[in-house]
Every structure is written in structure tokens, then in C-alpha cells.
Amino acid sequence: MARSKARRKTTAVQRNVRQGGDLQRLHIKVSSPRIVMYQVMRGMGKSLKVLLGLMLVAVIVLGSYRGVQSLFLDNEKYKLQEIDLQTNGYLDHARVVDLAGIDLEATIFAVSVEDVRERLSDLPEVVQCEVQRRLPGTLEIDIQERVPVAWIQCESVGFLGRRVNGVLIDENGITFPCGGARWQASQNLPVITMRTAKSENFNHGTKAQHVDLMRALHLMKTFSEADVRDEWLPEKITLINDYSMELVCNNESAAIFGMYDHKEQVEDYITIHEHCLAENRKRKNPAMKQEIKKMNLIPRKNIPVEFKKQPAQPEEPVLVKPRIRTTH
């Protein structure tokens, strides 16, 4: 057997091994003017492609806008011809157009439905508003307005009561200014007078933060639910203190109410007025009839009632025989 050729020994090369067993990789960066120029040209080519893509998108968007504008926004076929306004209150067409900023010369597609809805919904006297288009040229606006139940009067916060620019309040205690044609329908509403109040208690369009005012509204609600003659309905309510209020009805008689137990107090109020009316009907002589001036309904028993002073009854004429003159 031939002797095997002895293997030649070589010097072992030590590997540079990182922690974890991975071999360190050698990165070689080759640079030359030709390579740099090639890289620059390739970058410019990519940028040009992106620019051309953006220009193409811009052309498409501009063309679409011009098409929409020509087809809808500037098309006389869809010109605004009518505003169909539905409301339970007193916002008229002129005021709605002015407050909503509606361009009467534009088409219905040029009028922003959302913008009109937001502007009208932000009005303190509006509960909710719905706006929609009806082709070819009608804009439908459906508004639910607040229904006022009384005027608010308080000099310290600038509420002047029954005035054209006064402040109204609905049954939920939400205040709003009187504007437009609402004055004609609201001028006979009762007035709630507060002797003291703070301006921060009132933010038009939201519920007033005044406890005693809420109690006065509750009294008015109790009256509206009861069977009361028109002449005995509230004409003015004045908050006296934190436990009482004075009501003056349409026939100018007054009554003191508490802050609570309004149902029982209104029942006593009606009973006393009806009793006085029945007694007056029995009296044939008008001079004998009595009119209530004031009553205090806070006591549960023995309610004090004050009557107006009646004119004195005319006395029967006294017949005096003339004396016979004597002659001298």
C-alpha cells in the first residue's frame, strides 16, 4: 500500500465572531464618478415619475371639479327657485335667509346644506333644524322653535321684561331673545320678575341656572294644567324671597304662593275666587259686590283674604220740611 501523502499544515485564521455566533459581515462601498452619475440619474428618474403622477392626479381632480361645476354648480336648471320653510314658530323667510347666509342667486348644489343646518341650529330659539335639497330647485328647511311661556325681568342682568328685544323663557327654563315676528305673538305673555340674579346663571339656548326661577315656572305649569278662568291666570309673578312669590292675575288681584305644594295652593286659589264670584252673583246691588285684593296661600288653614274697599253706599235722602216764616 502506498503511503498516504502527508497533509500540509497551514496557519489557522482566527474568525471574528460576534456575541451569539454571527459572523461579522464586511461592507465594501465602491465609489466612482460613473457610479455616482448613474445613481443621480436613477434618482431623478424616480422623482420625475412621482411628479408626473401628481400632475396626472391634479389634472383628473381639476377636470372632475370643472365637470361637477358645469353640470351642477353653474347649471341654471338647478338654480334655487324656492325655500320651503316649515316652522312652528315665527322665523320668516327673510330672517332665515339672512341668518343662514343663503345665496338666492346660486344653485341648490352651491348652497351648503350642512352649513345652513348648523347656523340655524345654533340659534337659541331653535330646538332642531333639518335641511335638504329637492330637485330641481327647492331647498326644504324644517325648523322646530321653542315655545315661550313668559318674559324674564331682572335689572341686574339687563333683562327688561316685556320689550321687543326682551328675553323669553320656555317651559323647560331655556332662555332666548325675542326677535323677528315673535313679539306680536308673545307680548301678552306673563312676566317673571327676579329681584336679584347673576349673569352667569343665564346662557341663551341652555337651561337657566336659577332655582327660584324654576319654581316660578313650575307654578305656571300648574296653572296651565288646572281649569282656571282667564281673568285669574297669571299676568305677573314676582320672586319675593327664597320661600315665597307674589302672583298678580289678569284682573289685578294678587296672591302669595310658596315655592312648593303648588297643586294644593292653586286648588285653594280657584276655590276662593269661585266662592267670591258665586256670592257676587247673589248680590243684586252692584255696590255690595266684593273684589279680592290679595290672599296668602302659604297657610294650609285659615287662608287670609283681603278685599278691595267698596265705595260707600249712598245714604237715603233726608226730607226736610221748610219752616213757615212768621210776620211781625
Image (cartoon, rainbow, N blue to C red):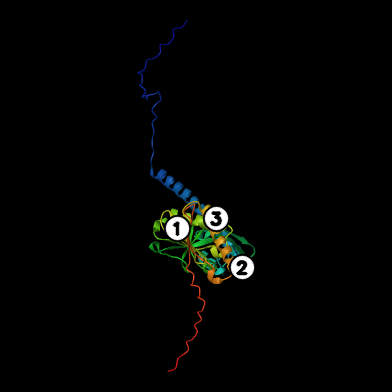
- Residue 207 visible in the displayed image: no
| Residue found farthest to the top | 1
- Image height of 321 relative to 247, above or below: below
Closer to the eye: label 1 or 3: 3
- Sequence-earlier tag: 1 or 3: 1
Q: Mark 1 — residue?
A: 245
Disc 3 residue crowd, few under 14, some 14–19, many 20+, Cα 10 Å: some
- Image height of 82 relative to 114, above or below: below
- Sequence-earlier tag: 2 or 3: 2
Task: Return the x and y of residue 81 as percentages of the image width and height.
Answer: 61, 68
In the rendered structure, find residue 82 and report the number of the disc placed on it. Answer: 2
Quadrant placement of the C terminus: bottom left
Q: Amino acid at mark 3?
A: Glu
Q: Amino acid at mark 1?
A: Met
- The residues bearing labels 2 and 3 have C-alpha atoms spaced at a distance of 51 Å
Query: Of 307 and 253, which appears nearest the observer?
Result: 307
Closer to the eye: label 2 or 1: 1
Q: Mark 3 — residue?
A: 267
